[in-house]
Amino acid sequence: MTVTKIEPLSKTRYKVYLDGQFAFTLYKGELSRYHIAEESVIEDDIYDSLRLSVIKRAKLRAMHLLSDMGRTESQLRTKLKQGGYAEDAVEAAIRYVKSFGYINDMEYARSFIDSRKDRKSKKELYAALLQKGVPAEIVEQVFEEADYGEKDSRQAIEALMRKRSYNPETADVKEKQKMMGYLMRKGFSYQDVRNVLQVCE
């Protein structure tokens, strides 16, 4: 395999392209140790050794990213790619952390909904999870299991009213309309908002 391009990723790390394809990211010291330069040839045994080393690094990086904070599979994959890891190393790292149960989109969605359902609408929660890369079918399944309903909506609406220091007893028509508009923009249904505001009156 011929090194066709070496591209700096940082002061110490370089993306190495073999036969026109991105192969892996190596440290400056590795380039020097293995005499890797543009137009040089990498033997198969050296390539295998470097690939295994990079995969090991990707696994450690994935573990570090997950110890930092919970992530969805999609978020972790994006982070690893941003870190300069090639597709094969990313997939190996994903399989590795999955085997220990360190990433589980179903559990992530459950925890996400449970910790925020008292202050966000179902619509907001749904959109946020999709944005984090959780597949729609998983989000829907978790909502079904969680039995998110009118009671959860009511609690979230009441929490947002308290947060905005909205007092239904002293609010005039304009303030009520403003609060209704705010809650509906947050994704609550007209009916749910109306029900809560009327009960508070």
Image (cartoon, rainbow, N blue to C red):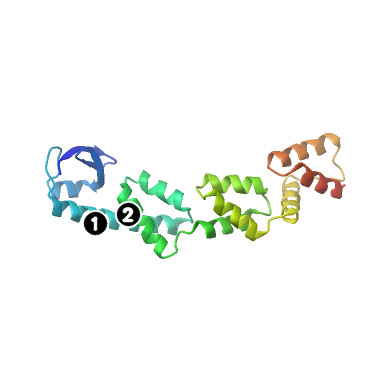
- Other residues around mark 1 within 10 Å, as few (<14) / some (14–19) / many (≥20): few
Residue at point 52%, 50% (across, down): 135
Q: Nearer the viewer, residue 158 or 40?
A: 40
- Give the x, y percent position of residue 27: 23, 48
Quarter of the figure with residue 16: top left
Q: Which mark is residue 52?
A: 1
Residue 65 in view here: yes
| Residue that numbered label 2 is attached to | 58
- Give the x, y percent position of residue 122: 66, 49
What amino acid is found at the position of numbered circle 2 in the picture? Ala
Residue at point 55%, 49% (across, down): 136
Check disc 1 and report its element: helix, strand or loop: helix
- Give the x, y percent position of residue 57: 30, 55
Q: Does 108 appear above or below 180?
A: below
Count of picture labels: 2
What amino acid is found at the position of numbered circle 1 in the picture? Leu
Q: Quadrant of the N terminus?
A: top left
Q: Nearer the viewer, residue 12 or 97?
A: 97
- Other residues around mark 2 within 10 Å, as few (<14) / some (14–19) / many (≥20): many
